[in-house]
Image: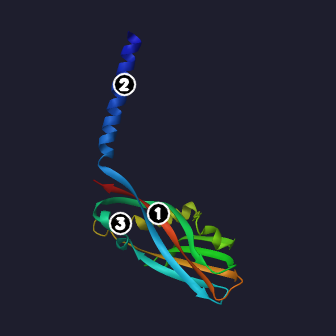
Amino acid sequence: MKVLFNKFILLIIFGSVIFSTGCDELNNLPLNIPVAFPFSTSGSSTALSDSATIRLSDVQEWRDNQDDIESVKYLSAAYYTESVSAGLKGDILVEVYNPLTNTVMLSETIKNVDPTKYINNAYVLGFSEAQIKLFDAYLSTLTSNNNDLSIKGRYKISSITGTTTPFQLTGRVEIVLETTVAL
């Protein structure tokens, strides 16, 4: 009987913890928002680049939840190829800037890559912890008075080799932001 009573007490305590925690969690909704930086390069040079500046309010999911976003931070990033000229290979540099200070926050170079490998498969970018902290610090400047930011992405392919000129490469880099949205 004592064992049954102890199990009952534990069940009540466990249920109370779940209920009280659950109520707080029902006030917020986690939402992952992908921010895509498209790029397109073409030419006969052995180094080609493109850049894009994205305003968060231009991203539909951000705009739909903009007034209710309580926090935001970096979650992940990936590179995708959409089209590429035959035989093209090179070193791909991906950089993300603070457009106000032109400071590089995230940067990675993918060495001697065959972009065709990433037409149907993403290359997951692996930024350093220090870079992610710098990017998160920039994202933390969002406030209820200023809930929109711009982010600049730069893409460069260098040391290009290939069998067809002009060299052509089109793709995108997607950064996924982890947000907390108030209900």
* Image side of residue 80 versus residue 26, left or right: right
Which of the 4 image quadrants contains residue 160? bottom right
Which residue lies under the disc numbered 3? 62
* Residue 176 tag number: 1
Picture coordinates of residue 51, whole percent (x, y): 51, 81
Q: CA distance from mark 1 to mark 2?
A: 39 Å
Q: Are marks 1 and 2 in contact (CB under 8 Å)?
A: no
Residue at x 31% of width, y 36% of height? 19
Say which element carries label 1.
strand
At label 1, which amino acid type do we have?
Val
Q: Quadrant of residue 42?
A: bottom right
Secondary structure of residue under mark 3: helix
The answer to whether 108 appears left or right of 163 in the picture is left
> Can the viewer see residue 101?
no
- Pinpoint residue 20: horizontal percent, then vertical percent: 31, 37
Looking at the picture, which amino acid does disc 2 mark?
A: Leu
Q: Give the labeled residue for mark 2.
A: 11
Q: Position of residue 84 (x, y in %)?
A: 61, 78
